[in-house]
Every structure is written in C-alpha cells, then in structure tokens.
Image (cartoon, grey):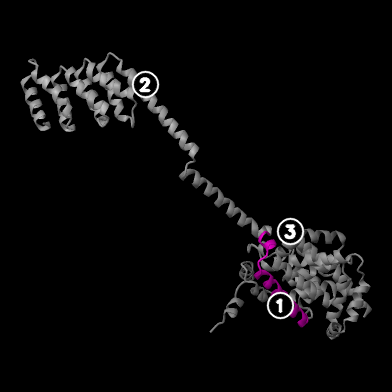
Amino acid sequence: MEQERINGLVEKYNQGQAGPADIRLIEQLIEEGRIDLSQLAQLKQLDDLVMKFETPAPSADLDDNFYQMLKTVKQKNKRFSWSRFFAWPEFAPKLAFASVMLIIGFLGGYLFFPSPSSNKEVAELKDEVLQMKEMMMLSLLEKESATERLKAVSLTSEMSSVSDKVTNALLQTLNNDENINVRLEALEALKPFVRDSRIRSELVRSIGKQDSPLVQVALAELMVQLQEKSSVKELRKILENKNTPRDVKKQIEEGIKTMT
Amino acid sequence: MKTPVQDLETFSDNALMLKVKDGHLDTLGLLFERYKKPLFGFFYGMNKDPELSEDLVQNVFFRILKYRYLFRGEGDFKTWMFHIARNVNHDHYRKNKLGKAESVESWENRLGHDDAYSVQLQQDEEAKMLTLALGRLPADKREIILLSKYQEKKYKEIGEILGCSEGAVKVKVFRALQELKVVYQQLEKQM
C-alpha cells in the first residue's frame, strides 16, 4: 500500500471516522510495522496518560516480608540438607562429574594396571611365540642350505630363554655340521648358556670332535675365558695330533698355560 | 570512597541476577529495591487489592530465588521477572477460582473500600477515571496495557513474555487501547 493511502487512513482514524474495515486494515498495518501506535493521536493521548499515571507505592510491610523471606532462605541454604544435595538441577552436574571421574578411573586402572588374567594371557602368548620360534629354528637346521642353517642358529639370539631341545640341537650342529661357519655360529649361540655345567662339559667333549682348526681355536679361547680346567686333557689331544697346524698348536699351548 | 554496595548498585540487572544465581542471595535485595514498585503497580493495576498485590510481589521474588538456577543471563532480567509475575498472577486466580468470577462490581467495591489508595486517586480526576476504565477492561486487555506501561513499551520483550511476535503485541496493545478509549469516553459522559 502506498504511503499516501496509509497516511490517509491514519488521518481518518484520528478524526474518528474509521469504520470496522478500516480498523482491520490498520491492525494489519500495525502488525507489519507500517503504522506506529504513536501516529494514532487519540490513542497516543490515552497511552501517554497510562504511562504518566502513577500507581500507589507498596507499604513498608512488603519490605519487611521480603527481607524476612530472604533471611529465611539464606539460613536454609547454609544448613546442609540431603534433599537439596540431591535436588536434580544442582545434583545433575555433580552426578555427571562423578560419572566422568569414575570412567576415567576405570580406564586408568585398566591401562596402567593390567589385570592378572590379562597378564596370564600375555605370558601364554609369549610362550606360544617362543615355541613357534624353536620349531622354526629346529626345522631350519634340517635344511640343506648352509645359509638357512646359519639363520636357524642366529634365531636363538632372539630368544629370551631356550629349552634343552634347542641347546641339544645347537651342540649337535657344533659337532656335526659340515659347514665351518655354521659350527662357529653354533658355538657363538651357545656362549650365553655356558653357565649350565651340562653345556660346559658338552663343549669340552666337543673339542675332540673338531677337525677344523678355526673351531678348535674358538673352542680353546672359550675354555680359557671360562678357565675350564677339565678341557686341558682334550686340548692336549689336539696338540698331539700331527695334522694340527703349528699356529693352532701354539695358540692352544698358550691357552693351556693360562689355565694351569 | 565507594562502598561495595554502591558499586553493586551500578551493576546491570543481569549481572546482579547472575550473582544471586552464584549464591550471593543478598544481591537480590538490590533487584527488589529496583522493581518492587513497578511489580506492585502491575499487580495493583490487575486486582486493585494492595495487600494481595504485596503478597504477589513477594511471591515473584520467592520464585526468582527458587528458580535462580534457570536464569541464564542471555535475555533481559526484567522480561524474565515479568514472565514470572504473570505466572504468579495466573496461578493466584486459578487457585482461588476468582479469574472468571471476578466482576467489575467487586473490583470497584474493593477500590471503594481501600480508603488510603482511593483518596490519593480522587485527588486526580483523570487518574480516577483511568483507573475505573482500566478496571472495566477484560483481564487480558488490562494486562497488556499494564505490561506495556511497566515494560516501557518494549514490545519485543512483551512478546517474549506472552509468547507472540512483536507485531502481534502491537495489535493487542492497539485493541486494548481502543477498548479503553471507549470505556473512558463512556465514563466521561457519566461524570
């Protein structure tokens, strides 16, 4: 609607000539914000009167009652009450906080202190892996390729503990393998277990079975390191052997000297 | 040197109410001092019963204390307070089943019996006529005029109290003033 027509309508209303249809139209324009209530002069006069009109003041009783009520509520607030503690609006955040802390506690406990049952599971798993490695090692030792057998022997270095089956296999390799490198590697692999007297005596016995000077020297050095006096007899046998190279004999002799 | 109370007096309504929410219940006293008169005026305008109006003002502040945790500080405190005031008024009439039974006569009788207030009003002819005219309006129209007065014509906020649009509030005010004008003119003729 044009502004001029709106102005005309307002004018008509202010002169008290607006009919019901005009009133409806005015209401619509007021709702749309195109006519301001202050434009309607007659109503504005009355509205001003309403705004100006002073209501009587409340009595002093209101003040007294209010401050008394405030005092009572404050006193109640100071006292601890279970019903207030559990009042939902205030209790809900407390409950939420407690729940979160509980969950964090459980998670922390689970992560930092694994339960005995999970400990047992881990141990079982480790055991299974070890057994698998042993099996792999034993089967690799059967291979024809020396490289595969070398790999098998070096596998023992990854094992934290080994069974007698493994040490026996290593001793057998040391005594019987046709490849010198594999035998030397087997001797190397047995070194961590020399505290075991059975292994030490097997090593002493192994001296007489070796024909390779390299292995003989390596064994002699190990015996010196261990100060294994029982090996002297076996070492002397090597010295007595005509086929033993001179350098080897010299090294073994020096070794025997340090032990006797 | 300013005292802490003087400092608080310069705080906005919302800041004070948030303090109340935080447990500084004494701060409500400042809001009470600011709004006891407008609230009393609103209730008195609705029922013309000073004692009842005082009780209802007290109820409003009691509810403000009780439901202080609901105040979020996003809207205007005054709007929230008048919202509560309106509910207090409705609850009172619902409880006492006076709402519909209330007649203009009983309302005028109350005005007549209340000497302290009527004397004050009689001194001002215009005010007396206006009070009478307001009393003859239906409760919803009387309410919108009083809300417009005490909310200082902030129609958007009144819309929030009534749950309608700003435009709808303006139309309600227009209709109420229209009716008030008619009643007022009738009274003028009788004088």
Magenta segment main secondary structure: helix
Name above or below for residue A164 compared with residue B106.
above
Can residue A37 be seen in this snapshot?
Answer: yes
Residue A72 painted magenta: yes
Tell me the quarter of the picture where residue A37 sits. Answer: bottom right
Q: Which residue is mark 2?
A: A135
In the picture provided, is A167 more to the left or to the right than B178?
left
The span shown in magenta is A57-86
**Element type where label 3 sits in the image:** loop
Proximity of marks 2 and 3: CB atoms separated by less than 8 Å? no
Mark 1 or mark 3: which is in front?
1
Residue A207, position as x, y percentages in the image: 17, 21
- Dot 2: chain letter: A
Q: Which chain does the numbered disc 3 sit on?
A: B
Whether residue A46 can be seen here: no
The numbered mark at residue A67 is 1
Q: Which residue is depicted at the point 23% across and 16% down?
A: A176
Counting from the top left corner in percent of width and height, residue A83 is at 70, 61
Give percent across and percent down for residue A112: 46, 45
Look at 22% across and 18% down and name the residue there. A175
Q: Nearer the viewer, residue B86 or A227?
A: A227
Check residue B165 in the rendering and tell me which mark sits there, or answer none: 3
A119, A167: nearer the viewer: A167
